[in-house]
Amino acid sequence: MVSLVLVSHSRALAEGAAALAREMGGDVPIALAAGLDDPPGAIGTDAMKVLAAIEQVYSEDGVAVLMDLGSAVLSAETALEFLDEERRARVRLCNAPFVEGAIAAAAQARIGASLEQVVAEAEAAGRDKGIAPQQPRSPHEVAEPTPLAVPPEGTLKAQFTLPNVLGIHARPAARIVQMLSTLQAEVTVRNVTLGSAPANARSLNALLLLGARKGHVVEVSAAGPDAARVLDQFQALIAENLGDPPEEGATTGVVLAAVPEGALKGIAASPGVAMGKAHWLHRATPQAQAESHANTPRNAAHEHQRLERALAQARERIAALSEHVARAHGASAAAIFQAHLSLLDDPALRAEAERALSEGFSAEQALQRAAAQLAEPLAQSEDALLRARAADVNDVVQQVLAQLAPSALEEHQLSADNTPLVLCAEAFAPSEVARLPANVVALCAVGDSAVSHAAILARAAGVPAVFGVGEALRTVGDGHTLIVDGDGGFVLAAPSATLQAHYAERLAQRDQQRRAAQQAAHLPAQTRSGKRVEVAANIGSLEDAQRALEQGADGVGLFRTEFLFLDRTAPPDEEEQYHAYRAIAALLQGRRLVVRTLDVGGDKPLAWLALPKENNPFLGLRGLRLCLARPEVFQVQLRALARVACEFPLHVMFPMVSTLEEWRAARAMWEEVAAPLGARAALGIMVETPAAALQAELFAPEVDFFSVGTNDLTQYVFAAERGNPALAHLNDAFHPVVLALIERVCQAAHAHGKWVGVCGELGADTRAIPALVALGVDELSVAPAAVARVKQTIRALP
C-alpha cells in the first residue's frame, strides 16, 4: 500500500488535513512533518523531520509527499538527497493542493492504486473545486442525456435520483471508488440534471466535480464482465442513503453552513432544534415589593417570624419542585434543588439575616443583605462555574421573597393555546426551567453559560437552548419567529420561508427518528457491518439507573458517586455507601456497572471537607488527587465497593489520573481493602488529562479499561475553561487534536485486549458518533434520555 507524508509549516494544519485524509483512507499510513521544535510550535519546515517521516511510513509500494507552501518543497527535496538511491526512486513529491490532494491520495491508496495513480489523482484534485453552477436546473427539468464519446459495446445504463442532502460528496465518492476496485468494468457517471460530461467513476475527484446534490439525477454506465453487478451495487448504495447517516439525509435541498449568515451566535447550552414564536419572560417582581417593606424600621421579633414562615414555605415549594424534577428527569437533576434546600439553612445566610433584623430592617431587606454576602463574591469570580452558582443563591432568595410578598408569586404568564414558544430572558433561574409550560419548545438567553444549572436542567428535559447570545437578542420582539439550533449554538431571527420549511422538515424527520429509535431502544446497537457498541448510561442514583434501563441502556458506564457526598454536613459512612452501591448492582442483574470513585474539588467542593483555597481549583486538588490526599475518606468508599464486588460484577474507575504513580497508589489502596474480603473487580481510569492520553501505552498493560471524559479532556487540551463564554470556540471536543488523543487511547487499549468507553457529552453527539466508532471506541455512556437516539445512530453506520 502506498503511504503518505504531509509536509506543512503548521502542525495544526497538517493534523487537520491528516484527519480528513484518514476518513477517506482508513488504515493508509500517514506521517507528518510539520512545524518546528525550536521554539516549540513555531511555524516552518525542517528537512530532517521530512526525512524521519518518510522513513517512518516507507513502503515498497511507494511514498507520496504533499507540501503546503513553496519552502516546504525545498525541505522535501533536501530530505530526498539523504535517502539511498533505491528508496529515493519510490518517493514522489506531489504538485497537489495540500488538503484536497491528501484526501484524494488517501482514497486511492486505500484501494491499492499504484504510486503513479495516487500522485495523478492527488494532483488532479487542484483543477477545480467542484462548485455547481449558480442556477442549476430543477431536479424535475432533466437534461437530454449526453452520449459517451465512444460508447463501449454492451454498455448497461441506469439512472438514479440522489436521496441525501450532500449528494456525491467525499464519503460517498470514496465508497464508490472502493466498491469498484473489486469489479471488472469500465464505469462512468454523469450528472443528468446539470448536463455534465461522463466522469470516470474510479476517480474520487472526477466524482466530486459532478456537483451532484440531493434530487439530482445521475446516470451510471458500465461495460465489462461485472457491468450488471455495478448497477446492482449502485442501487444498493442509493438505498443506503449513499452511506450518510439519517441526519444528513434530510429530504430538503437546503444545505446549511455550520452557522448560517445572519445568525445570532451563542453557546450551545442544550442540544436539539426547535422553532416557535419568541416570548420574553415577564417575571413577577418580589424585589420591588421587598424594597417597599424596607423603608420603615420594623419590630425585630415580628420580622423574624415573617422570615421564618417564608423560609418554611419556600422549603416546601422547593422540595416539591425537587420531587417533580426527580420523577421527570432523575435524581441527578433533582440534586440541584436539594442544594437549594441546603442554601435555606446556610449558617452564614442565617447569621447575616438575623444581624440585619436586629438593626431594624424588614425581613425582605434582611434577606437581601444576607444573600448579597453570599452571591456577590460568587458573581465576581473569574471561575464561570462559581459565577453560575450565584444564580442559585438569587433563585432561592426570590423564592423566599415571593412568600413574603404573595401577590408577587406568579407562574409564567404565557399564551393559553398550544402555540410553540421560544422563551427569552436575560438569564434563567433553575426553578423557572424546572416548571416550563408544555408549549415552550426552546430557551434563549442574553447571558448565562452552558455550565449553569438552568442549562443542566434544559438538557435533562430535552429542551434545546442557546445561551450567551448577547445584546443582539434584545432586538427580537415578542411574536417574532425564532429558530433555535442548540446543536450549532445559534439562533435565527426572522428566518426566510425557505429556512422555516427546511427546519420544519428537519423537526418532522427528527420526531420520526425519535419514535423509531424508542421502539428499538432495547435492541443491541450494532453497525451494518456487524460491530457491536455498548450504549450505557451516566447516572447518579438508583432512580437514574431505573430510568436508564427503561430507556434501553445496556448498563451503567458512569455512576457518579459524588452525589452521595454533596450537600451534607458529614460524609456517608460505609454502610450507607454499601447499600446505595448494592441496590444499583442488584437492579442491573449482571449488566456492566462502572462506579467512579469520589470526584470532587474543582466545581464540586464539599462543605464537610475543609480544603485550602485554590487560585485555580480545576488544576488543583480534585478527583483522585484529593482521594489519595484524604485516605480516611477514600478507604471507606473502597471498602463499601469491595463488599459489593463480593456479590456482583463491578468495575471501579478512578477519575483525574495523570501519572502511573497515581494509578498504582489507587490500585494498591483497593487491593489493601479488597484482599481480606476476597473481592475482585475490574479497575480502570478516566482519561481526562492530556497526560493520561499520551501515556495510554504505559497504562494499557496495567488497567482493565479506559473511559474518556471528553468534557475535561477538551478544556485541558486547549487550556480553556469550558464554562467561559469568551472561549466557547475552543470548547470543541470534535477537534482533530482531541480525536487524535482518543484514537491513541483506543489503539493502546486494543493492543492489550482492553476496552475503551467515552462518557463525556461527545458520546451523545450524533455528529461525533461515526468518528468515535471509527476510531475504535467500544462503549458510549450517555444520559438515559439519549440512549435510544445513540443506539439508532450506531445502527445506521456502515
Image: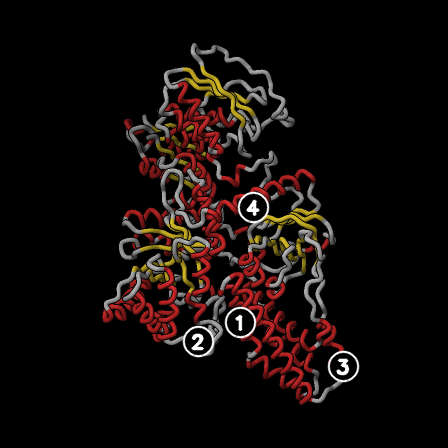
Residue 56 drawn above or below residue 94 = below
Q: Nearer the viewer, mark 1 or mark 3?
A: 1
In the rendering, at what x and y percent does residue 261 appear?
65, 42
Instruction: Please tell me whether mark 1 sits on a helix, a strand or a loop.
Output: helix
The residue labelled by disc 3 is 295
Q: Amino acid at mark 2?
A: Leu
In the rendering, at what x and y percent does residue 380 appear?
60, 68
Q: Amino acid at mark 4?
A: Asp
The residue labelled by disc 1 is 339
Query: CA–CA distance between discs 4 and 1?
Result: 35 Å
Q: Dot 2, how many residues are within 10 Å of its Cα: few (below 14), some (14-19), or many (20+)?
A: some
Query: CA–CA distance between discs 3 and 4?
Result: 55 Å
Q: Amino acid at mark 3?
A: Asn
Q: Nearer the viewer, mark 4 or mark 1?
A: 4
The answer to whether the residues at label 2 and label 1 have Cβ atoms under 8 Å apart is no
Q: Which mark is residue 609?
A: 2
Residue 654 visible? The answer is: yes
Q: Which mark is residue 349?
A: none
Q: Residue at x 32, y 27 (%)?
A: 90
Instruction: Please tell me whether mark 3 sits on a helix, a strand or a loop.
Output: loop
In the rendering, at what x and y percent does residue 41 appear?
45, 48
User: Which of the marked residues, 4 or 2, is nearer the chain's N terminus?
Assistant: 4
Q: Amino acid at mark 1?
A: Ala
The residue labelled by disc 4 is 511
